[in-house]
Every structure is written in C-alpha cells, then in structure tokens.
Amino acid sequence: MSGGHVVRLAGARVVYGHGATAFEALRGIDLTIRAGELTLLLGPSGSGKTTLLQVMGCLLRPTGGEVELFGQALAGRGPEALAQLRLRHVGFVFQHYNLFPTLRAWENVAIALDLKQVPRARQRAVAGDLLERLGLGDRQAHFPAELSGGQKQRVAIARALAGRPELLLADEPTAALDGRTGQEVAGVLHALAHQDGCAVVVVSHDPRMERFGDRILHLEDGHLKDDRRPPRPPDPPLSPP
Ligand SMILES: Nc1ncnc2c1ncn2[C@@H]1O[C@H](COP(=O)(O)OP(=O)(O)OP(=O)(O)O)[C@@H](O)[C@H]1O
C-alpha cells in the first residue's frame, strides 16, 4: 500500500475469541479514508461498525490484513508506538460524551491538552478558543451536569480537537440527542471535514446523519456492502446559531 491517504485497510479481519467460541467480526475489509470528507458508516447492530472504528483508531490490532495510517504500516508496531500515533493524529467522540463530571467544560478540554504537553498556563486559553469555536464561549465554566446533551457533545468534540487530529472518529455521536441538536452536532462534524480538512468517520444508526455523509458505507456481517454519494451534501456553518 502507498501513502497519501489518512487510513487504508487491506483485507482487514478481526476475530474475537478462540476455538469453538471464535467469532469473525470483520471479514476482509478494503477501505480508504480520505482527508476533507465525512464518511458515514451504517449497518445493523453487531455488523462490526465499532470494531472497524477501533481498528482505524489503532485501539484494536486486526487479526489479519494490513492497516496504514498516514502512509505508515502499523504491522509490527508495539502498543507504545500505537498509543503515540493515536495521541498525535486521532480524536475520538463517543455517544455518551465520556466527560469528567467533576471538571468544568474547559477543564475537560484541558485534560487532552495536558496529554499533548501544552503548557498549563496556555491550556485555559486554548480550551477557551476551542469551546468558543464550537459555540460554547459562555459555557466554559459549567460542569457537564449543567449542560444540555448537545452542549456536552460539543465539549467532547472540542476535547477531541485539542490534539489537532487529522482523523476524527465518532461512534454514534448523535444517538442520545434530539433531532435538532443531533443535526447541529452533525453539522459541526461535517464542517470539520470541509473547513479544516479533517478526515471524519461517523458510525451511526441515525438516518438524519445521511445527508451529512460525503460517502456512505454499509457494513453487514463484517463485510462492506457499497459506497455511494448522496446527490448534494450540505455546507452548514461550524457554529450552531
Ligand atoms: N470483545 C469482544 N469479544 C467477543 N465478541 C465481540 C467483542 N466485541 C464485539 N464482539 C462481537 O463482534 C460483533 C461486532 O461488534 P461491534 O460492536 O463491532 O458491532 P456494531 O456494528 O458496532 O454493533 P452496535 O451497533 O450494536 O454497536 C458483534 O457480534 C459482537 O457481539
């Protein structure tokens, strides 16, 4: 495989368990993820979507096949090298936000800046800029319990962006949100791909996400089914109104 793409998988397989209980969750995935696009990954429960996201994010080493991140093959790299790759290049967003309840919004973002070794004196300002950008300038000192679901998810996106990732992986980011808020969060993710050139991959059951996908991939029983483009992707502003 050659470089130039954010992620490339060739014949990627994942088998969970051993012997009689072995289960093949991914059965030979060939896939390229490009910068500047939102790739939407759809599929029924148990089809392997989260497993595929974990392989792309170096959280899970495939049982077989090849994975390349930024043109670098992952085979043979140890856990520490994979952790460094993740830290430098990949941001994660989850359905349930995974915010620390005892930390304020800006502190939840600053945690990620700490890992990136941004000096402590700068962290508040950088976290503030990120939250401002996501429309949360006036919510920086709030605790998660004082924020709406959409605001919590935007804090989680700000935290994922703290490391300036080239690859943003989101697992059901709108599943816990109502329609309008889900659309706003989807618009933020879409804008990150289009305005910042990030490669964004979103796993979703949510049909409302479809219009935000530049590419739509369908996973069934560990196989990729097809790849189609909707006729006209929207171009919403980054900050919700
Ligand atoms: N750690 C594990 N050990 C054994 N089997 C697992 C493990 N993780 C996932 N699986 C199985 O692998 C298959 C794919 O799981 P995965 O979580 O990737 O699916 P999914 O498409 O994300 O599902 P959902 O939409 O329900 O989250 C499922 O059948 C699941 O039961």
Image (cartoon, helix red, strand yellow):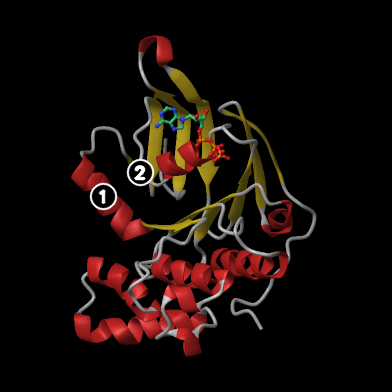
**Disc 2 element:** loop
In the rendered view, does 113 fall on the left or right side of 24?
A: left
Q: Residue 103 lies in what quarter of the image?
A: bottom left
The kind of residue tagged 1 is Ala
* Foreground of the two, 89 or 160: 160
211 or 110, which is in the foreground? 110
Assign the N terminus to one quadrant of the image. Answer: top left
Above or below, comparing residue 171 to residue 163 in the picture: above
Q: Which residue is mark 1?
A: 83
Give the left or right position of residue 75, taking residue 221 as reference. Answer: left
Judging by the rendered image, the residue that carries numbered circle 2 is 58
Q: Is residue 154 left or right of residue 206?
A: left
Q: Nearer the viewer, residue 230 or 72?
A: 230
Q: Residue at x 66, y 54 (%)?
A: 214
Q: CA distance from mark 2 to mark 1?
A: 8 Å
Quarter of the picture containing the C terminus is: bottom right
Q: Looking at the image, which residue is at 31% across and 68% down?
A: 112
Q: Tell me the crowding category of disc 1: few under 14, some 14 to 19, or many 20 or more residues within 10 angstroms, Cα based.
A: some
Q: Is residue 214 above or below residue 52?
A: below
- Say whether marks 2 and 1 touch (CB < 8 Å): yes
